[in-house]
Amino acid sequence: MTSALFSPIKLADLELANRIVVSPMCQYSADDGVASGWHITHLGMLANSGAALVVLEATGTERRGRITHGCLGLYSDDCEAAVARVVAHCRRYGTAKLGIQLAHAGRKASARRPWEGGQPLAPGEDAWQTIAPSAIAFGPDWPVPREMTAADMERVRDGFVDAARRAIRAGIDAIELHAAHGYLLHSFLSPISNKRSDGYGGSLTARMRYPLEIARRCVRSCRGACRLARASPATIGPRAD
């Protein structure tokens, strides 16, 4: 009897050799969002584990979107080049396809690493102002985030799209948008954390509006980037600007 677990599957244009997927796991080992030697070691091992798909950890689409100072990012040329190096290493020595989870931590950002307690960073620890759909703190000991303006929302939208394009250029096969665990996109979905009155809060349809706008823009962007990559692969690489 053939095992479904070890049989191939096709998800849109992505063909996987089996149904085993390594979920994204935060490593808190990046330098200003730039992947380190640890990522090459960690992900290189997983790429050669027999799993068909390995998903890189929650990756910030802007600096303030990281959970901690050690979180991976994809918001600069240095970040993109480092992810491309990790991808190239995994391609050379492993067999798995590679995905990435694009994320923005919202009001849960600016925190210490888990082994440092996971609480909000103090002012002397290079803490930063967090943003959220509404000025509601994540918990009693957390700072109140700044309610996002229209300009903030547009910048974050563009950040997700830019990160998606960078991921494609770096050689990533699949992109996942993080909309759980109380991070930014999830906080728009929840009536507890989203009290907006500008068309992005209130009903479920309105609360879903912003995450769906980001998803649609990312999908359109990725389709365009993939067409470009297929047409002229030599042009895909870290941006010069």
Image (cartoon, rainbow, N blue to C red):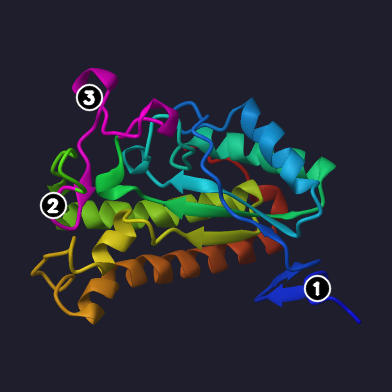
Vertical position of residue 107 compared to residue 158: above or below = above
Which quadrant holds residue 197?
Answer: bottom left
Foreground residue, 225 or 104?
104
Q: Position of residue 74 (x, y in %)?
A: 48, 42
Residue 26 at what x, y percent from top left? 51, 42
Residue 75 horizontal side relative to residue 126, left or right: right
- Tell me the amino acid under the disc marked 3: Ala
For image coordinates 27% across by 73% down, the residue present is 209
Residue at the limit of the structure toward the left, as seen here: 197
Q: Residue at x 73, y 45 (%)?
A: 46
Residues shaded magenta: 111-137
- Residue 136, which numbered label? 2
Q: Is residue 179 left or right of residue 40?
A: left
Q: Earlier in the sequence, mark 2 or mark 1?
A: 1
Distance between the Cα atoms at labels 1 and 3? 49 Å
In magenta stretch: residue 136? yes
Q: Judge from the rendering whether residue 22 lies leftward or rightward of residue 102; answer left or right.
A: right
Q: Which mark is residue 236?
A: none
Q: Which one is closest to the eye, mark 1 or mark 3?
A: 3
Residue at image position (16%, 47%) is: 137
Is most of the magenta stretch helix, strand or loop?
A: loop
Q: Of 179 and 181, which appears nearest the observer?
A: 181
**Which x, y percent locates residue 63?**
36, 37
Q: Are marks 1 and 3 in contact (CB under 8 Å)?
A: no
Q: Which secondary structure, mark 2?
A: loop
- Residue at the spot of label 3: 122
Q: Is residue 8 magenta?
A: no
In 3D space, how far apart are the residues under numbered discs 2 and 3 (Cα atoms)? 19 Å
> To which residue does mark 1 refer?
8
Q: CA distance from mark 2 to mark 1?
A: 45 Å
Identify the element where label 3 is drawn.
loop
